[in-house]
Amino acid sequence: MTKDPDKPISGTWVHVFEQDSPQGAVFRPEHTDIPLSRRPRERVELHEDGTAVLLMPGPDDGYVGQPARWSEEGDAIVVRDAKDRVRLRIVESSADKLIVQMPRPGAPR
């Protein structure tokens, strides 16, 4: 994984799907200029202590938080949900962008 050791990944990151590439999904810090979208944007809060919250769009256009945790595993940072399923695999990080591989629905986790 390409990671800038001087730049922490903690904070809230927003999926900017318009910028996705073959390398993975693009997440940007929530404080950046993110285009408005009718499609709800997934978010993830990463905390320095290894905990995380997956913020998924809910039925009322709000977000539903799901507890998770993250850890470095090999060359990636892996976010696992409370059932120990891999939800996100961060393969590249910088101060303004995460490149994330997300399991496809129905794929083994």
Image (cartoon, rainbow, N blue to C red):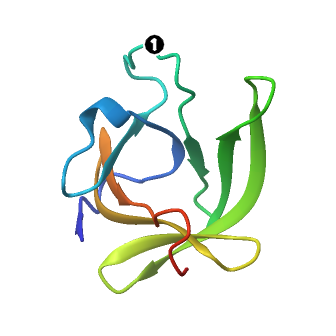
> Picture coordinates of residue 76 (x, y %)?
35, 74
In the image, taking residue 77 as reference, residue 49 lies left or right, namely: right
In the image, taking residue 37 as reference, residue 22 lies left or right, namely: left
Q: Quadrant of residue 97?
A: top left
Q: Which residue is mark 1?
A: 36
In the image, taking residue 54 as reference, residue 104 lies left or right, namely: left
Q: Report the residue at 38% width, 15% height from top.
A: 35
**Image mark count:** 1
| The one of 39 and 46 positioned closer to us in this rendering | 39
Q: Quadrant of the N terminus?
A: bottom left
Q: Quadrant of residue 16?
A: top left
In the image, taking residue 9 as reference, residue 76 lies left or right, namely: left
Q: Residues within 10 Å of mark 1 (few under 14, many from 20)?
A: few
Residue 17: tell me if it is visible: yes
Instruction: From this view, report whether residue 56 is shown above or below residue 2.
Output: above
Q: Quadrant of the C terminus?
A: bottom right
The amino acid type of the residue labelled 1 equals Leu
Q: Report the residue at 28% width, 55% height from top.
A: 24
Q: Report the residue at 75% width, 77% height from top.
A: 83
In the image as oriented, which residue stretches furthest toward the bottom? Answer: 74
